[in-house]
Image: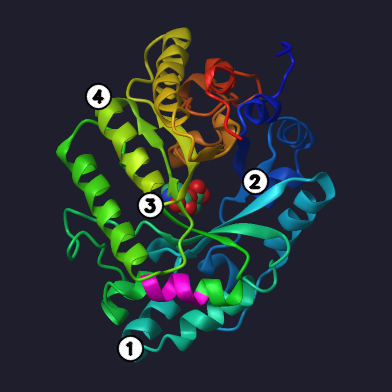
């Protein structure tokens, strides 16, 4: 692989894709970000524009513009768009949560799905249908207590997948969730809970095609459970599902250390993680939650506009000035070392 090979090409060499989350406003105002994105990404995930609260902030007040822009951008440049996300408690507008709990009428969910699934039927081939359904600490049988769960019971996941399939029969339907990665009892319990959910869905022939691993790594969490994670991925694959790393980034634990050391720690965490996940052939691609530290959701509110770069979290492949960091080279190396899949 040549020195200049971008991540997209490195991923392709391993039979995978590489992509990043992006916001339409960032892209529109920044030619350099566009150039970097076009170079490295074969997939983009709208960071916020396909969430219910972004698309329908008030009943019937549809706002499709930003998502349409990203879809058009993808089409113009041969970049796939991932649909994120149909059902997520945190991105469900308050008015809809109140109505769900009050009426317990699935028609509201069908109506929401109907606003986006048919609209992007040709453009979006992969959807996170349910985001973050697992909660082993405060949940009900491992299922997070959300407005949907309270209104319709734990079966809401099955209903959502069936409803999405009815409206977008060709789309790959995913469940997306976090914290399956580290050597601690919570992550272990979460892996088990997700496997149980998959098992229930498969037993009932529910259309589910993939699992998204958010992979928000956190340097304060200690060691990855490499064996546990690898076993979990094999079990997910054993159900016939594909897997994607959907939101990779790294939260630092010590922003006072020298920059080279900080960047090395981030890169090492990514290397360890991708070493495990890319060993599993069911893992089809890797998406980072943004490209540049400048745009990362991990920045504290007050550090977002800082010119002092050292104050920023450095958990994405590019720094705030769009310089490539060790994390970038590590991702590239991980693809180069991965066993290629067909
Ligand atoms: C985050 C975005 O990055 C923020 O800009 C937004 O304010 C909230 O959502 N898990 C997910 C993503 O599935 O949708 C979240 O994205 C980050 C956590």
Q: Are marks 1 and 3 in contact (CB under 8 Å)?
A: no
Q: Is residue 2 visible?
A: yes
Q: Quadrant of residue 124?
A: bottom right
If the image is split into quadrants, where does the C terminus sit? Answer: top right
Q: Are marks 4 and 1 in contact (CB under 8 Å)?
A: no
Disc with the residue nearer the chain's start (2 vs 4): 2
Category of crowding for the residue at label 4, using alpha-carbon neighbours closer than 10 angstroms: few (below 14), some (14–19), many (at least 20): few
Mark 3 to mark 4: distance in Å?
A: 30 Å
Q: Are marks 3 and 4 in contact (CB under 8 Å)?
A: no
Q: Which residues are magenta?
A: 158-163
Q: Are marks 2 and 4 in contact (CB under 8 Å)?
A: no
Q: Answer with left or right where residue 304 lies relative to residue 217.
A: right
Residue 102 badge = 1
Residue topped by disc 2: 44
Q: Is residue 183 above or below residue 257?
A: below
Give coordinates of residue 335: x percent, y percent. 57, 23
| Residue at disc 2, secondary structure | strand
Give coordinates of residue 130: x percent, y percent. 43, 62
Residue topped by disc 3: 239
Residue drawn at x 24%, y 56% is 135
Mark 4 to mark 1: distance in Å?
A: 43 Å
- Tag in front: 1 or 3: 3
Q: Is residue 25 above or below residue 42?
A: below
Residue 222 badge = 4
Category of crowding for the residue at label 2, using alpha-carbon neighbours closer than 10 angstroms: few (below 14), some (14–19), many (at least 20): many
Q: Is residue 134 above or below residue 333?
A: below
Disc with the residue nearer the chain's start (4 vs 1): 1
Mark 1 to mark 2: distance in Å?
A: 36 Å
Mark 2 to mark 4: distance in Å?
A: 30 Å
Please count the marks in the image: 4
If the image is split into quadrants, where does the N terminus sit? Answer: top right
- Tag in front: 3 or 2: 3
């Amino acid at each position: 692989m040549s020195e200049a090979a971008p991540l997209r090409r490195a991923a392709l060499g391993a039979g995978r894709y590489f992509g990043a989350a992006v916001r339409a406003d960032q892209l529109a105002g920044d030619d350099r970000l566009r150039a970097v994105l076009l170079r490295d990404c074969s997939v983009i995930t709208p960071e916020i524009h396909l969430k219910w609260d972004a698309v329908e902030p008030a009943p019937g007040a549809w706002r499709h513009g930003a998502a349409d822009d990203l879809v058009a951008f993808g089409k113009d440049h041969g970049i796939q768009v991932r649909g994120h996300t149909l059902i997520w408690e945190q991105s469900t507008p308050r008015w809809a949560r109140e109505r769900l709990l009050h009426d317990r009428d699935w028609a509201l969910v069908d109506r929401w799905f109907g606003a986006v699934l048919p609209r992007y039927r040709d453009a979006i081939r992969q959807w996170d249908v349910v985001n973050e359904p697992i909660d082993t600490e405060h949940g009900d049988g491992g299922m997070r207590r959300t407005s949907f769960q309270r209104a319709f019971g734990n079966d809401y996941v099955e209903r959502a997948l069936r409803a999405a399939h009815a409206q977008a029969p060709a789309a790959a339907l995913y469940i997306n969730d976090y914290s399956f990665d580290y050597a601690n009892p919570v992550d272990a319990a979460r892996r088990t809970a997700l496997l149980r959910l998959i098992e229930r869905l498969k037993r009932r022939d529910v259309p589910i095609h993939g699992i998204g691993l958010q992979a928000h790594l956190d340097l304060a969490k200690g060691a990855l459970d490499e064996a546990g994670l690898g076993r979990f991925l094999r079990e997910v694959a054993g159900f016939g599902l594909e897997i994607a790393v959907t939101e990779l980034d790294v939260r630092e634990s010590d922003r006072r250390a020298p920059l080279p050391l900080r960047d090395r720690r981030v890169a090492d965490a990514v290397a360890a993680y991708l070493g495990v996940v890319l060993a599993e052939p069911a893992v089809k691609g890797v998406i980072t939650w943004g490209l540049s530290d400048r745009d990362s959701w991990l920045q504290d509110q007050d550090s977002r506009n800082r010119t002092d770069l050292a104050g920023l979290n450095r958990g994405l492949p590019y720094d705030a000035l769009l310089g490539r960091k060790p994390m970038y080279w590590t991702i590239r190396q991980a693809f180069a070392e991965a066993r290629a899949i067909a």
